Image (tube, coloured by chain):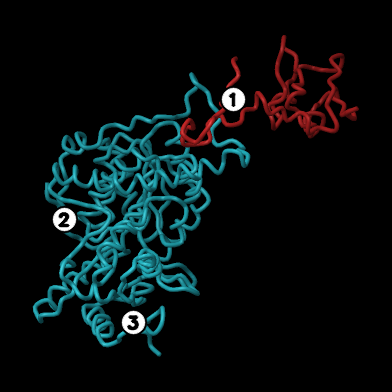
Amino acid sequence: MRKVIMGNHALSYGAMLSRAEVIAAYPITPQTEVVELLSEMCANGILKAKFIKVESEHSAMAACVGASAAGARTFTATSSQGLALMHEVLHWAVGARLPVVMGNINRAFAPPWSIWTEQNDSIAQRDTGWIQIYASSNQEVLDSVIQAYKVAEKVLLPAMIVLDAFVLSHTSEVVDVPEQEKVDAYLPPYEPRYKLDPDDPHAFGGLTKPDWYYELRYQIEQAMEEAKNVIEETGKEFEERFGRYYGMVEEYKTEDAELILVASSTIASTARVVVDMLREEGKKVGLLRIRVLRPFPKEKVAMILKNAKKVAVIDRNISFGMSGAFYAETKAALYNEKDKPPIWGYIAGLGGRDVRIEDIKGIIENTYKEDNPKKDIYWIGVKL
Amino acid sequence: MEEKEIRFKSVKDMPPMAMSLGTMRINKTGTWRNIKPVIDYDKCIKCMFCWKFCPDASVDIKDELPVINYDYCKGCGICAAECPAQAIEMVKEE
């Protein structure tokens, strides 16, 4: 059924169709509508889930961890300060290998208070071991929740669907809400391989000495590697059943491109339009949208970019003292390639400032103009 | 109950999380203690405050009487402090 819904409700519908069994969340702008709708669904019986009201995001994630350890399919959503407060328990979900799925609405950190979009909140959780999927439309948000459960439960790692505050979270788009039976056929009930079971008691996560802790970390990295293939496979199966494909990256007119833009989230959607505009002017420009930041699709990124003449990465985040995160990752992915293009790194749209068509055109213009990057950070539109 | 500790040869034999890698059946934390609670059963009024307050669940109930489990008691003294009948004395470990 086609519905006009905001990105936040796309998350709620995704969790509902995935038949989440335990939902624990704490409200925060711009995430509130996600759990508002889910609590309504639980209250009126549309969704047969236990809705746990908690006093903080730390508790929300802890409740999800407990429920997941007991074998339930769990969901939560948060943003910015809330995600930061979850930080400790995010590591727990990974170490305990629990396939919790959550939505994170990208919002800039305080101070000063801001409610607008910026990726620094999710970038700061990049190294926890969560799978991170950056969506660029409300349809992709809904579909990614369903796909994320399939991936997470296969590789036993938690997964985070990331979307821009307001640009997606509060913007209504036409979304095809799939039928429950079709989702059920794609995503069967969660069958945990290991769970808290009074009939077969085990100690989970107890003190582990250096003799085996190291191996457990090795296993997490193996699971991340496996996740790359599982994301592609589940994406293809999703396409067969629903007609929409989602992989690690999205390539747009990259095959013959001499200049490739690298972007994520909704900036990539705008960049797609810019690519079309410049193609009409005869400029060979393409777009590589990085959909999954963890696991990072380094092989794919290297393969797609190595034959371009120039690459320009746009980051709506900054790792202070270094550069934009996607820029650093992209450079790292190409470093061991023999022939590689120079890579420019542009910071844009922090704190929710609009990244307009003109801004992206300016980025391309500057990249064409220079032979080599002069610095690691080019600030777009900063009032100097 | 049978011994639950699992030994592995390599990472391939392991479950993906720390599951019964260590077990309290083997890791007897009572050795950390330097003073121990001793119950005077003549004074004990069977209120079970010691059982209820023990933070390490190291007080068992046997035949309606509290019994300290010295395999795990770390000697914190909370039972002695809470005992309304002053029936528990903290004694130095020899």
**Displayed quadrant of residue A126:** bottom left
Q: Residues within 10 Å of mark 3 (few under 14, many from 20)?
A: some
User: Mark 1, mark 3: which one is toward the viewer?
Assistant: 1
Task: Identify the chain of the residue marked 3, using the numbered disc in the image.
Answer: A
Q: Amino acid at mark 3?
A: Ile
Which mark, residue A4? 2
Q: Is B35 on the left or on the right of A159, as rendered?
A: right
| Residue identifier under label 1 | B5
Q: Is A379 on the left or on the right of B41, as rendered?
A: left
Question: Chain B drawn in what color?
Answer: red
Q: Residues within 10 Å of mark 2 (few under 14, many from 20)?
A: some
Task: Look at the picture and state if A37 lies above or below A310.
Answer: above
Say whether disc 2 or disc 3 marks the residue closer to the N-terminus: 2
Q: Is B60 on the left or on the right of B89, as rendered?
A: left
Q: Amino acid at mark 1?
A: Glu
Task: Identify the chain of the residue marked 1, using the numbered disc in the image.
Answer: B
Q: Which chain is cyan?
A: A
Verify CB contact (< 8 Å) between mark 2 and mark 3: no
**Displayed quadrant of residue A49:** top left
In the structure shown, which secondary structural element does the residue marked by tag 2 occupy? strand
Q: Amino acid at mark 2?
A: Val
Q: Residue at (17%, 47%) from the top-left corner?
A: A177
Task: Identify the chain of the residue marked 2, using the numbered disc in the image.
Answer: A
User: Mark 2, mark 1: which one is toward the viewer?
Assistant: 1
Task: Look at the picture and state if B20 lies above or below A212.
Answer: above
In the structure shown, which secondary structural element does the residue marked by tag 3 occupy? loop
| Residue identifier under label 3 | A380
| Residue at the farthest front position | A338
Q: Position of residue A4 (x, y in %)?
A: 16, 55
Q: Residue at (22%, 57%) from the top-left corner?
A: A138
Which mark, residue A123? none
